[in-house]
């Protein structure tokens, strides 16, 4: 029994040795040179011709300074260092720190009067800016009632011209209708100027009862005199006002009224032939 056990032990040792030799043979092909981080280390030493050649470099040596060659560095004590070094932080703090002990700024007390004055100041500035307007500004405001009268008169003449045009035929009717539309255009220009001054659209309703029953020649004579009177009124108001835009508007209307008088005179001359 003991002999069988010894025989098995010998066979097992031979098999293990054979396996180890085969493993070493294969491992040498995989890892020909041993490494320190390798998990497997073989007992057999690596041949000298296969081992990697490493070159050791010598560490640089610090220069030695002898006592004779050492520079003469004066020794500074702690007390002298503190006295010599400037206190930068203290100086900057003193230069930038606000003077708290200075007297506070004098501020006006918050009262209702001060608040009201502050609120009204922008309004007075706007009002002053309006006074400086030269085109349909404050200089033209006193003539608002004149503009209203002119608008009503132009609308009345517009209705009279159109009413007479309905009674006429041919070229006479067309001419009177053109004069009526011109009068309406005059009223529109005056109404626009009045709206700029007041912010109110003034356009009175036409009175349908102001139809003319005069004969054609009498109507032409009446309108001839009326156009001259309106032209004179426009020029009078234009010379009185200092507003440049209102003066220009009234002078333009006066010239158109003069043109209407020439047309009415031509119509009368045609009737007289």
Image (cartoon, rainbow, N blue to C red):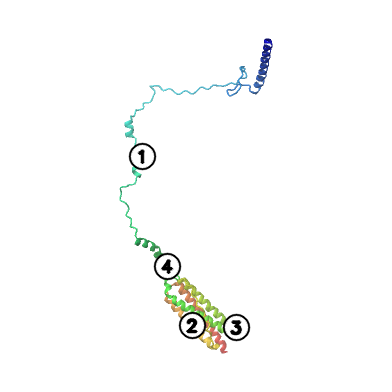
State which mark lies toward you, 2 or 1. Answer: 1
Mark 3 = which residue?
171
Mark 2 = which residue?
228
State which mark lies toward you, 2 or 4. Answer: 4
Within 10 Å of disc 2 (Cα), the crowding (few <14, some 14-19, many 20+) is some
Residue at the spot x=53%, y=76% of the render? Answer: 185
Q: Is disc 2 placed on a helix, strand or loop?
A: helix
Of the residues under marks 1 and 4, which one precedes in the sequence? 1
Q: Is disc 3 placed on a helix, strand or loop?
A: helix
Q: Looking at the picture, how far across and down is residue 105, in whole percent?
A: 32, 53
Of the residues under marks 4 and 3, which one precedes in the sequence? 4
Residue at the spot x=65%, y=21% of the render? Answer: 27
Q: Quadrant of the N terminus?
A: top right
Which picture quadrant has residue 198?
A: bottom left
Badge 2 vs badge 1, beta-carbon distance below 8 Å: no
Badge 4 vs badge 3, beta-carbon distance below 8 Å: no
Measure the C-alpha gap from mark 3 to mark 1.
103 Å
Compared across the picture, whether 6 is left or right of 113 comes to: right
Name the residue at the top extreme: 3
Name the residue at the front extreme: 1
State which mark lies toward you, 4 or 3. Answer: 4
Q: Is disc 1 placed on a helix, strand or loop?
A: helix
State which mark lies toward you, 3 or 1. Answer: 1
Q: Looking at the picture, how far across and down is residue 221, in whole percent?
A: 52, 87
Measure the C-alpha gap from mark 2 to mark 4.
35 Å
Check residue 89 in the rendering and tell me which mark sits there, or answer none: 1
């Amino acid at each position: 029994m003991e002999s069988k056990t010894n025989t098995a032990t010998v066979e097992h040792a031979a098999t293990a040795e054979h396996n180890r030799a085969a493993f070493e043979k294969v491992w040498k092909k995989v890892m020909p040179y041993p490494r320190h981080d390798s998990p497997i280390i073989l007992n057999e030493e690596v041949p000298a011709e296969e081992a990697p050649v490493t070159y050791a470099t010598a560490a640089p040596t610090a220069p030695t300074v002898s006592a004779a060659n050492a520079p003469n560095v004066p020794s500074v004590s702690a007390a002298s260092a503190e006295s010599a070094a400037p206190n930068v932080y203290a100086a900057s703090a003193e230069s930038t720190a606000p003077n708290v002990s200075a007297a506070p700024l004098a501020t006006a007390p918050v009262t209702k009067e001060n608040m009201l004055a502050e609120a009204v100041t922008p309004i007075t500035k706007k009002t002053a800016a309006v006074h400086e307007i030269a085109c349909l500004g404050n200089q033209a405001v006193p003539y608002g009632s004149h503009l209203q009268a002119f608008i009503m008169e132009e609308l009345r003449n517009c209705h009279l011209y159109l009413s007479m045009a309905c009674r006429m035929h041919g070229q006479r009717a067309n001419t009177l209708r053109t004069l009526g539309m011109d009068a309406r255009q005059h009223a529109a220009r005056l109404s626009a100027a009045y709206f700029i001054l007041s912010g109110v659209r003034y356009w009175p309703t036409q009175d349908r009862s102001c139809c003319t029953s005069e004969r054609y020649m009498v109507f032409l004579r009446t309108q001839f005199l009326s156009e001259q009177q309106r032209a004179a009124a426009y020029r009078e108001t234009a010379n009185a006002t200092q507003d440049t835009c209102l003066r220009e508007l009234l002078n333009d209307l006066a010239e158109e009224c003069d043109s209407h008088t020439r047309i009415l005179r031509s119509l009368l001359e045609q009737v007289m032939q």
